[in-house]
Amino acid sequence: MNEELILIQITGEDRPGLTASMMEILARYDCSVMDIGQADIHNTLSLGILIRVDEDASGHVMKHVLFKASELGVNVRFSPVPKEEYSTWVSLQGKNRYILTLLGRKLEASQMAAVSNVIAQQGLNIDAIRRLTGRVPLDGAREGVRACIEFSLRGTPTDRSAMQAELMHMSATHEMDCSLQRDDMWRRMRRLICFDMDSTLITTEVIDELALRAGVGDQVKEITARAMRGEIDFKESFTERVALLRGLDVSVMQDIAEHLPITEGADRLMYVLKRYGYKIAILSGGFTYFGEYLQKRWGIDYVYANELEVGDNGCLTGNYVGEIVDGRRKAELLKLIAQVEKVDLQQTIAVGDGANDLPMLSEAGLGIAFHAKPRVVANAKQSINTIGLDGVLYFLGFKDSYLDDRAGARL
C-alpha cells in the first residue's frame, strides 16, 4: 500500500464543530493524524493537520474536505510533504526546548521585533506563541493593565549566556521583562517559593520605618541603601542600624505592621500560589514581627527573619537575638526548607531585590530579581521591573484564563 503525507491548512472564521466535521471526513478514509495544531486569533482560526493517507483515497479526502470548507465558509490549502522532509522534521523534535516569556505594561511590535531578532541570531526556531494575559482595553485606562506573551522555542542557542545577557539588557532599554527557561519537567513542577520581604512583598524597609519613629531615619536609611547596593557587609550594616533603635517603644511595631504598604500584585500572587498548592516562605533580613504579620495575612508556611531584643521596660535594647538572616543564611534556609518539603532545588523559586538576596536567587531553580538594585539585576537571569509582583505568575506559565475573578485575573 502506497501512502502520502498531506498537510491540510484551514483558515477563516472560527465556529463550533468545524474541527469535528473535518475529523469525521479523515476518519471515514482511515487517515492517520501525524501532527495537528490550532490557533485562534480574534475569532480567526488557523488549523493545521498533517495526515498520512492511502494514495488511492487521497483524492477523495481532499475533495470532501474542500466541499466541507466551502460549506463552512473557510479556506483550505493542501500541501504534499515528502517523506524525507517529514523524517528530518521528526529528528529535530528531540532538540532542546526553551520558553521565553515577554512581560510589560504593554507590548509593542518594536519589543517583539527586538526579541525575535535575538531568537533568530541564536539559531532557535519559534514553534508557538501564546498570550498569557487577558486582552488589553483599547483606551488603556484600566488600572493594573499588563501584557504577556510566551514564545516556545526549539533548538540549542549558539551562546545561551550571551542570549541571556542580551535579553536582560533589552529589558532595561525596551520597558519590558524577559525570562528564558529550559522547557523541562522542573519548569512545570515548581513547588516552593521563597520571598524577601522588605521592598519585595512590601514597598518599604521596616527598619527605615522604625528608625523614623526613633528619630534616626536619615542615618539608618543611608546605611540601608548602601547595604542593599552591596557596598557594605550586611551583618555589619544590620548591627549598626539596630543599635540606633535603642530606646524605641515596641508598641510602635503594631502600628507600622497595620500600615505596611503592600506591593502591587502581592495579594493576587499569594492567593493563586496557595490555591495551587505552593509552599511559601519569607526569608527576610528584616524582622520577625512583621514577617509573622504577613504570614497571618496570606497563610505563609515559613517565616525566617531577625528578632529584636526587648528590654524589661518594653523598649528595644539596640541588640538582636539569634543568628542574623543575611544572604548566606537565606540560601541555607532555602535548601533546608526544600529538604523538609522533599522538593528538588530545581523546583524552587526565589524572589528578592537586594544584594543579600543574590545567594538564594542563584541557588533556586528560578531566581527572580524584583524591582531590584542594579547590582542584583546585573547578576540575575530573570527580572521583573515593569509590573507588580503577580508578574511571577507569568514566569511560571499561568494564564489569566486559568484563574478566577477573585484573583483579579481577568482584565
Image (spheres, rainbow, N blue to C red):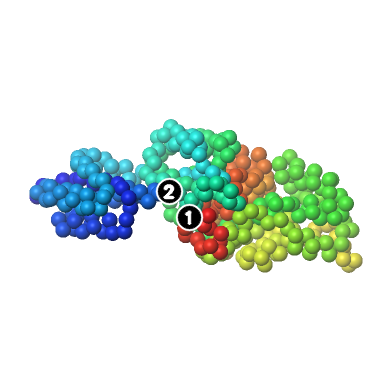
Q: For mark 2, does the 10 Å Cα neighbourhood hold few (<14), some (14 to 19), or many (20 or more) residues?
A: some
Q: What residue sits 41% from the left and 43% below the top?
A: 153
Foreground residue among 72 and 314: 72
Q: Which mark is residue 127?
A: none
Residue that label 2 marks: 130
Coordinates of residue 80 in the picture (x, y in percent)? 19, 41
Q: In this view, does 152 lie above or below 270?
A: above
Does the CB distance between marks 1 and 2 fall below 8 Å? yes
Can you give x and y, in whole percent of width and height, for residue 158 in the image?
A: 43, 34
Q: Is mark 1 on a helix, strand or loop?
A: loop
**Horizontal and vertical percent for residue 248?**
87, 59
In screen coordinates, is 191 left or right of 354?
left
Residue type at tag 2: Arg
Judge left or right: residue 348 versus residue 260: left
Q: Mark 1 points at which residue?
A: 399
Comes first in the chain, label 1 or label 2: 2
The residue nearer to you, when weighing 26 against 155, is 26
